Each structure stands twice: as C-alpha cells, then as structure tokens.
C-alpha cells in the first residue's frame, strides 16, 4: 500500500512529530510504501526528517499561512500526481499546511487523525486565561474570554470556513476524550485509536533514593510550578526526595527561581532538552513520573512512555490522561493545579519502595498490552481499509 502522510512539521520537535515518524517507519517495516509530507518550518533547530516539503515558517508570516499556504497546495498537487497514494493520512495541517490542501484530497481515500484541539480551538488548548477549561465554541467568544485579538479571531473564522472536513472518508482521534470534545461541537469522529510508543527495555531496579521524574516542555500549561510546590511539601516529610526535570522552554529561568524560593533548588535537577536515549537513562532512575498538566491533555504521550519504561505515573485527572492511568494500579490521578493533592499522591508512591516497583510493573504490563506501536499500526491500517472501502476500492 502506498501511504502519504501529511503533517505540519518535519522535525522531531514534539510528541506529534515523533509519532508520525514512528508510524511512517513502522509502515515501511511492514513493506508499505510510506512517505511524509511536511512544511520546512523549524519550531526547534533540529534536522528535517520528512521526505517531501513545502514552505513553512515560525515567523509572524505563519499567521497568514494558517489560513492559506499556496505553496503547500502546489507542492502537494505534484506529490499526489507523482506518488499516486492509495491512502492519504492527515494529522496536523492547521498551523502550516493550511486548509488549502484539503480539496486536493477529495479523489483519494483519506483519513483525518485528530490529535489535539486545533479544529475547535484556535490556540489549541481549550483552556481559558485563568487556567480553567474552556467550554465555549470558537469565534467571538475567543475574544470575549481574552484568548485572542480581533484580527486573530478573524483569521480563525476564515480558517474554519475553508476547512472542508467532508473530504475525509474516516476520522479518528487519539483518545476517547478528544472524540467526545469534537463530537460535542458537531465534528464527526468514527473511533479513537490511542497512540503507541516504541518498545524499550524495562527500567533497572529502583535505587535507594526516591526520585520523581518529569518530562516535557517548560511552559505554563505543563504545570511544573505546581510540581515544584508539591516537591517542597513532600520534602517536609521526606527530605531525601529528589526531582529530575527533563525538558526546556521559556519558563525555565522562572522555574529555577521558584525552586530557589521554595528552598529545594539543591534537590531539583534541571536536565534541559535530552535526546531519547539520554531521556531514558535520566528517567530510568525515577520511582514515579509526574504529569501535572494544568490543561486537559488530549492524550499524554509522556505518561505512556513512562508506563512502557515500567514507571508509575501520577497525573492530572483531566483529558486523555485519565484513560491511561489506572488509580491504585499503575499510579494515581489528582486534581489539576492542586499541589497538596499532588504531594500526597507522590508520597503514596515513594514512601514504599516495593509499592513503587509493583505500580511500575503493572504500568509496563498495561503499556505492553495496549500502547505498543504494533497495536497502534494494526488499528491505523484497519482504518485505511475502511477508507478504501468508502471509495469503493479493494484493499491493497
């Protein structure tokens, strides 16, 4: 089968990009011919790993491209003519490729794979400025809530008007949570297909020092400030606890300052951005991984990666995270933004070495059963078959 994958970004700069590249490579291992089409935009200074590209940028010009990127449409027209895909699989297209690419897909069996809130939220968080979940429909309410300027609202409305979702034969999401949110706003979702994560060796036996791990961008919605406050509370009862923060971002300086103010700077390692193998080594020592997100994560890839490693997870209870973490079995769920509840849940894991080991073992078992790349690809290929049937074409 020839599969054309479309995605806004072609660097391994985030979980979505890691997943689309992993899918391409997994399809190739199964003898499918798969290529990845992306923009040339570089959200981080990393090499492009896509196969075909169109113009893209992270400059202010991006605001224009989000509504209409004519180069994306022109380049895609050429790729479609030359590659002649059996199926087109679209992930993110609203930040670089633009809705202009969608009409070109109408003759082809096409799958839309929704992994975030972009279709229903122009800023892709479904979170209000005060940190509470947004339940408004996108439009004028985005300005009234203080999320967007009037020009931004206008661009979003134009983009939505141009987004022709009827070109897709099947629509899938990465979690039941995202499926429900989209259906509530009138967008069809046929099924939820959870992300898969690469197999990796189990973490080594836990050491004698209790370590809490965090992985992710250092931005407000990730809730690292809440985690630091929770660690400060926890260390009042367990002064031996340490925290590893793997990731970088605009909040780093402020978070380091907060750690000093809380008197825990010597117990917190800000490791910065780590390559995947370095990440595994650093977080392999963690007794528990914290995912203290302030927003409702659509899926929560870092939680799935921790579970595959064999690490217990304590996470915010909102969004797709609640579909992965089984309280009392693979970790715990806590209210978002509640440092006291987070501290108590973390203590419940790290207070007992054996309990942390058992939770981690159960987390790995669950990941091996439900969150492997192979299981994910099986379900994606089955969705491709549905797209082919919808167009009256035999399976390939």
Image (cartoon, grey):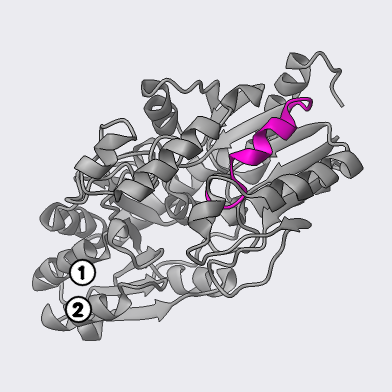
Residue 213 is drawn in which quadrant?
Answer: bottom left
Bounds of the magenta segment: 95-109
Mark 2 near mark 1, Cβ–Cβ under 8 Å? yes
Nearest the eye: 234 or 248: 248
User: Does residue 240 lie above or below 175 as drawn?
Assistant: below
In the rendered image, residue 335 lying in the magenta stretch gets the answer: no
Mark 2 element type: helix
Quarter of the figure that contains the N terminus: top right
Please name the residue that numbered disc 1 is placed on: 228
Left or right: 109, with 266 as reference point:
right
Structural crowding at the residue carrying mark 1, measured as other residues with C-alpha within 10 Å and reported as few (<14), some (14–19) or many (≥20): many
If you read the primary sequence from the N terminus, does the residue marked by circle 2 or circle 1 appear first?
Answer: 1
Question: Looking at the image, which residue sits at the far bottom?
Answer: 266
Nearest the eye: 267 or 321: 321
Tag on residue 184?
none
In the rendered image, residue 102 lying in the magenta stretch gets the answer: yes
Nearest the eye: 17 or 161: 161
The residues tagged by marks 2 and 1 sit, at their Cα atoms, a distance apart of 6 Å
Residue 391 image position (x, y, % from top left)? 77, 17
Mark 1 element type: helix
Please name the residue that numbered disc 2 is placed on: 259
User: Does residue 62 lie above or below 336 as drawn?
Assistant: below
Residue 217 visible here:
yes
């Amino acid at each position: 089968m020839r599969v054309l994958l479309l995605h806004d970004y072609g660097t391994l700069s985030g979980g979505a990009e890691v997943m689309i590249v992993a899918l391409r490579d997994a399809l190739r291992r199964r003898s499918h011919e798969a290529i990845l089409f992306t923009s040339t935009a570089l959200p981080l200074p990393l090499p492009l790993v896509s196969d075909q590209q169109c113009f893209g940028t992270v400059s202010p010009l991006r605001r224009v491209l989000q509504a209409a990127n004519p180069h994306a449409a022109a380049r895609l027209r050429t790729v479609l003519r030359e590659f002649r895909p059996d199926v087109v699989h679209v992930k993110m297209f609203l930040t670089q490729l633009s809705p202009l690419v969608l009409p070109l897909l109408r003759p082809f069996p096409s799958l839309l794979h929704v992994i975030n809130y972009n279709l229903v939220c122009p800023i892709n968080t479904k979170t209000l400025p005060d940190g509470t979940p947004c339940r408004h429909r996108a439009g004028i309410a985005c300005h009234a809530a203080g999320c967007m300027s009037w020009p931004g609202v206008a661009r979003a409305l134009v983009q939505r008007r141009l987004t022709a979702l009827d070109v897709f034969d099947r629509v899938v999401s990465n979690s039941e949570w995202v499926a429900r949110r989209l259906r509530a706003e009138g967008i069809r979702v046929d099924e939820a297909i959870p992300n898969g994560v690469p197999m990796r060796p189990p973490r080594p036996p836990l050491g004698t020092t209790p370590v809490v791990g965090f992985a992710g961008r250092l931005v407000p919605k990730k809730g690292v400030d809440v985690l630091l406050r929770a660690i400060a509370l926890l260390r009042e009862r367990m002064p031996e606890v340490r925290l590893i923060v793997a990731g970088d971002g605009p909040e780093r300086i402020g978070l380091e300052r907060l750690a000093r103010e809380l008197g825990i700077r010597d117990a917190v390692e800000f490791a910065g951005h780590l390559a995947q193998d370095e990440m595994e080594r650093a977080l392999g020592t963690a007794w528990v991984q914290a995912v203290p997100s302030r927003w409702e994560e659509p899926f929560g890839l870092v939680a799935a990666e921790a579970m595959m490693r064999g690490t217990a997870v304590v996470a915010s209870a909102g969004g797709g995270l609640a579909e992965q973490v089984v309280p009392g079995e693979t970790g715990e769920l806590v209210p978002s933004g509640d440092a006291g509840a987070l501290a108590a849940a973390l203590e419940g894991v790290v207070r007992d070495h054996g309990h942390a080991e058992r939770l981690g073992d159960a987390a790995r078992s669950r990941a091996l059963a439900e969150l492997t790349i192979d299981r994910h690809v099986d379900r994606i290929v089955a969705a491709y078959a549905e797209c082919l049937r919808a167009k009256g074409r035999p399976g390939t």
